[in-house]
């Protein structure tokens, strides 16, 4: 009875592993938006489920042989690990006879169908969760309407809305920091564009460093994108995945760079990307974006966004 309970536990564990294997499957699909870190984790889990399945099959085999007082051979033990699809049916017939072997094999097929159903359930659960997540990203919150009170820097402004003043960080762009060339010019460009004017604030991401991260419009003009077009800001690759057409910011940056607008008129070592400038004490060298193409830029976009924007 005790061994039967143990075998039932092994079967239950196999069911859990089958569900997990199905659940992680969609993350290994190249069409699924996933950062490299999560892809590595999903790959590790997938490999783990394969190893766990082999280990559980071997565990069931050991419990069953002990129950039946079947003498295990070295080659059969090894075969259960490397060639279980052949050795497992062989063991069933050897330990139970022809009739018992067919009955056991039938039960195994039933179990495999059950495991397939659990795997499908895991995959369906993941696909449903991904679809819900995608839907929530594609349905933006209603825009806030307010008046720009002041400009903090090239990608931050204060907006007066119903309920008070909010600090807004322009999502998907990164303007020069204080101490960098073109910091004053970028700040002035934003000021001349929106200060004292009515804007629509479309929240994109959560609040970081007391700032709402948003896409700001002045009429039909995308203020974030306009600053990139003028060469007053970089396209912030790691957060563009949170904007449906974020890849267009790579096109804006390429055009500004090609025509040497704003920061792109400077020597490359005078226009360090702001996200690298903030880490200048940690980095040994800085990236040169002089020859970057649109494809190079879009290849760096993290489809699920990133918390890097918190450092802006």
Image (cartoon, grey):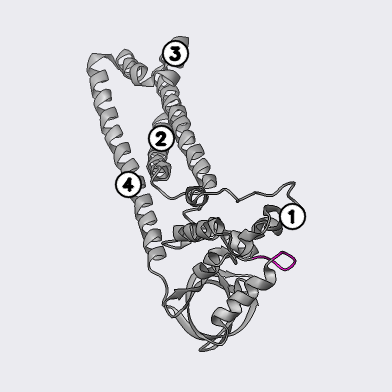
Placement of 307 over or under 163, stated as above or below: above
Q: Which mark is residue 72?
A: 3
Nearest to the eye among marks 1 and 4: give it.
1
- Relative side of 50 to 36, left or right: left
Which residues, given as a range, are shown in magenta? 176-181
Q: Residue furthest front?
A: 259
- Front-most of 221 and 125? 221
Dividing the picture into quadrants, the one containing residue 30 is top left
Placement of 221 over or under 234, stated as above or below: below
Q: Residues within 10 Å of mark 4 (few under 14, many from 20)?
A: some
User: Which of marks 3 and 1 precedes in the sequence?
Assistant: 3
Q: CA distance from mark 2 to mark 3?
A: 21 Å
User: Which of marks 4 and 2 precedes in the sequence?
Assistant: 2
- Relative side of 194 to 3, left or right: right
Q: Secondary structure at mark 4?
A: helix
**Residue pictured at 63% horizontal, 77% vertical:** 188
Q: Quadrant of the N terminus?
A: top left
Nearest to the eye among marks 2 and 3: give it.
3
Q: Which residue is mark 1?
A: 280
Q: Secondary structure at mark 3?
A: loop
The answer to whether the residue labelled 1 contacts the one labelled 4, judged by CB atoms less than 8 Å apart, is no
Q: CA distance from mark 3 to mark 4?
A: 36 Å
Q: Which residue is mark 2?
A: 5
User: Picture coordinates of residue 284 (x, y %)?
Assistant: 75, 46
Q: Secondary structure at mark 2?
A: helix
**Residue pictured at 63% horizontal, 60% vertical:** 265
Main SS of the magenta part reads loop
Q: CA distance from mark 1 to mark 3?
A: 63 Å
User: Picture coordinates of residue 113 (x, y %)?
Assistant: 27, 35
Nearest to the eye among marks 2 and 4: give it.
4
Q: Which residue is mark 4?
A: 121
């Amino acid at each position: 009875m005790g061994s039967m309970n143990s075998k039932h536990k092994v079967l239950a564990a196999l069911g859990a592993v089958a569900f997990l294997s199905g659940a992680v499957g969609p993350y290994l699909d190249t069409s699924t938006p996933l950062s490299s870190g999560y892809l590595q984790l999903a790959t590790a889990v997938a490999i783990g489920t394969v190893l766990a399945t082999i280990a559980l099959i071997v565990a069931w085999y050991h419990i069953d042989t002990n129950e039946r007082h079947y003498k295990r051979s070295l080659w059969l033990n090894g075969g259960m690990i490397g060639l279980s699809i052949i050795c497992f049916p062989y063991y069933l017939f050897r330990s139970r006879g022809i009739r018992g072997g067919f009955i056991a094999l039938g039960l195994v097929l039933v179990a495999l169908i059950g495991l397939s159903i659990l795997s499908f359930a895991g995959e369906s659960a993941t696909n449903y969760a991904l679809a819900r997540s995608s839907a929530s990203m594609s349905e933006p919150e209603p825009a806030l309407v307010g008046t720009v009170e002041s400009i903090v820097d090239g990608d931050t402004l204060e907006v007066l809305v119903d309920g008070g003043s909010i600090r807004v960080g322009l999502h998907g762009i990164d303007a020069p920091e204080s101490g960098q060339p073109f910091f004053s010019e970028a700040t002035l460009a934003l000021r001349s564009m929106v200060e004292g004017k009515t804007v629509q604030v479309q929240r994109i991401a959560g609040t970081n460093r007391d700032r709402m991260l948003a896409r700001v419009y002045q009429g039909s003009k995308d203020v974030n994108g306009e600053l990139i077009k003028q060469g007053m800001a970089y396209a912030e690759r790691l957060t563009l995945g949170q904007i449906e057409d974020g890849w267009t910011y790579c096109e804006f940056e390429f055009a500004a760079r090609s025509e040497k607008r704003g920061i792109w008129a400077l020597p490359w070592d005078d226009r360090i990307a702001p996200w690298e400038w903030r880490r200048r004490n940690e980095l040994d060298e800085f990236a040169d974006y002089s020859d970057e193409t649109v494809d190079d830029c879009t290849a760096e976009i993290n489809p699920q966004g990133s918390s890097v924007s918190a450092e802006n």
